[in-house]
Image: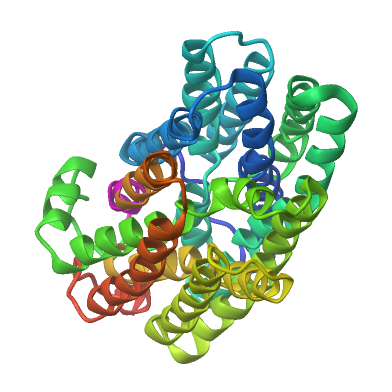
Amino acid sequence: MTRPGVGPAVDAGTRRRLANGVVIVSFLNIAISQGIHQSFPLFYVSMLDDFGWSRAATAAVFSLSMFITGSSGPLVGFGLQTLGARRWFCLGVLALAVGLAATARVSSGLGLYLAYGLLAALGLAALSWSVHGVVLTAWFQQHRGTVTAIAFSGAGLGAMALAPVSQAFINAFGWRGALVALAGVAAALLVPNLRWMRDPPETPSGLSPGQKPAGAWVEVRQALGTGAFWYGFAAFFFVALGSFSIQPHQAAFLVDAGFSTTVAAAVVSAVGLLSFAGRLLFGWVSDRYGHVASATASSLCSAVGTAALLLMSWRPHIALVVVFTVCFGLGFGTRSPVMASLAATKFSGPNFGVIFGAMTLGHGSGGALGPWLAGWLFDMTGTYRWVFLIATVAALLGNVGIFLAEHSPGLARPHPAEVKA
């Protein structure tokens, strides 16, 4: 018998076929869930008009969603380990679809926070890239950076595809009707998950003969005593702070600068497309040249993009919009597969999902703070300039965290090949 969340051992050919199916379903899960999530800037503009709230109060909905998504990391990792990949992802699909449909019916701030900020966010957490990273790194012992980048690139492609679709839905049905339509799109993910998602097969654990695996929370406590964990936590925090202080506000800033909602939707879509390309590119760079080289290049892209916005806050120009779109897009989300691959090299084992979930609390914290802080600073100063400066610095600090995590010890275990030998 196998423990929950781990499939039986299989031959090499079957393993390859099943693994390819898992990559495809992971790509679809991330594409749809993150595409919907990253379309929030378009709904944000409509919500501002409908509710008449301050930007901080409206952006706080996205902040709550990011907080729930990130802070549930250890719980999500434990749920995946307990229920297995297929059942866990199907639960996530249902929570996301019901949350979006419920958001379309809200008439108060509390209802909006509960429906989108809590219920839909729990679905996003269950379908998050970090959870898929745990499953994928268990399936693949080699080329982890490339494989996770392929699956994670779905976030970029999903944003590229769903941004114009969401805007078209909003134009045709209003933002509430658009959310109902997107709930239907999310629910369709049940089909591929039930058909092709599989738990990773049993693999050598790296334990000595007769040695029992440590409990999940025991290993989390051990991981908390390592530098790699805390530097990774800090890297996640600063990367998310820099990215998500910009992402939900980008459409509002462009509209404030005099550009049309069509241009804003095109930028959101283009950022998604370039993020798709960037994840593939920097995942390949990670496998070929190392985590630090990949993270440095993507961090510089993000910093240049947010610096372009800083300049545009004084002198709006379409050329600066292009620089922002290209550079921010190439850097957006591209450190996630790098961090998943890096964490797997430091903390691989049967409890990796819970440890990685705890590490991604940094991402949830930074992602929760960023949208609200950006809205609050705008409400206080009437400009996003301080936001763009903070985002630029945060992108560089995130890279420092990745560098330090790479050069710090994790939980030492023998390589599976050594155990087999």
**Quarter of the N terminus within the rendering:** top left
Q: Is residue 201 visible?
A: no
Q: Main secondary structure of the magenta part?
A: helix
User: Where is residue 202 drawn, in percent x and y?
Assistant: 45, 54
- Tell me if 124 is positioned left or right of 398 in this view: right
Front residue of 19/59: it is 59
Q: Indicate whether 246 appears above or below 339.
A: above
Front residue of 294/367: it is 367
User: Where is residue 383 drawn, in percent x and y?
Assistant: 47, 51
- Which residue does the image show at 43% across and 37% down from the upper left? 63
- Which residue does the image show at 48% across and 37% down from the upper left? 125
User: Where is residue 274 drawn, in percent x and y?
Assistant: 69, 69
Q: What residue occupies the far bottom of the structure in this picture?
A: 289
Q: Indicate whether 240 appears above or below 408.
A: above
Q: Is residue 363 visible?
A: yes
Q: Is residue 43 magenta?
A: no
Please give the range of residues in magenta: 349-361
**Quarter of the C terminus within the rendering:** bottom left
